[in-house]
Image (tube, grey):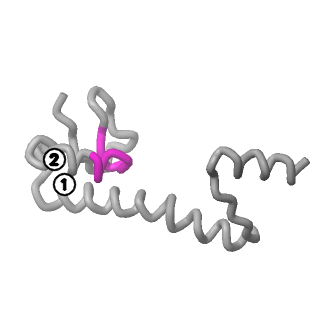
Amino acid sequence: MAGEFLGWIKKIGARVASMDAEEHDELCAWISHLPQFISTALAAALVEEYGEDAPLLEAGGRALREMTRISPALTPCGATSPSPTRRTLPMRC
């Protein structure tokens, strides 16, 4: 059954990579968690440098919004920060 499934996946153009669990976990940490860390660090650094009321997202444009959109340090429009002590990069709606 697994061989049939892999054959079907390959037919639709996907590339299949076989790896052990440890290698998979390390790879996922780099491709999943590292972007999250970078986004959060950027948003936190901007808030620390310019303050919570600075129009950072407007000034930074699309590139900054994309770089910080997955950051938990960024508060979406209308949302409140989950922690009263968390510093956020507010979005202007």
In this rendering, is residue 78 above or below 12?
above
Give the extent of the magenta segment: 66-75
Q: Quadrant of residue 75?
A: top left
Q: Position of residue 51 (x, y in %)?
A: 12, 52
- Residue for point 26% across, 50% down: 87
Which residue is disc 2 drawn over?
A: 52
- Residue for point 42% across, 57% down: 36
Q: Is residue 57 magenta?
A: no
Image quadrant in which the C terminus is located: top left
User: Left or right of 18: which side holds 60?
Assistant: left
Q: Position of residue 55 (x, y in %)?
A: 9, 43
User: Left or right of 6: which side holds 91?
Assistant: left
- Taking depth in this image into account, of 61 and 39 the one nearest to the observer is 61
Tags 2 and 1 touching, CB below 8 Å: yes
Q: Position of residue 47 (x, y in %)?
A: 19, 54
Q: Amino acid at mark 1?
A: Val
- Residue for point 21% across, 40% down: 90
Q: Quadrant of residue 41?
A: bottom left
Which residue is disc 1 drawn over?
A: 47
Element at badge 2?
loop
Q: Is residue 73 magenta?
A: yes
Element at badge 1?
helix
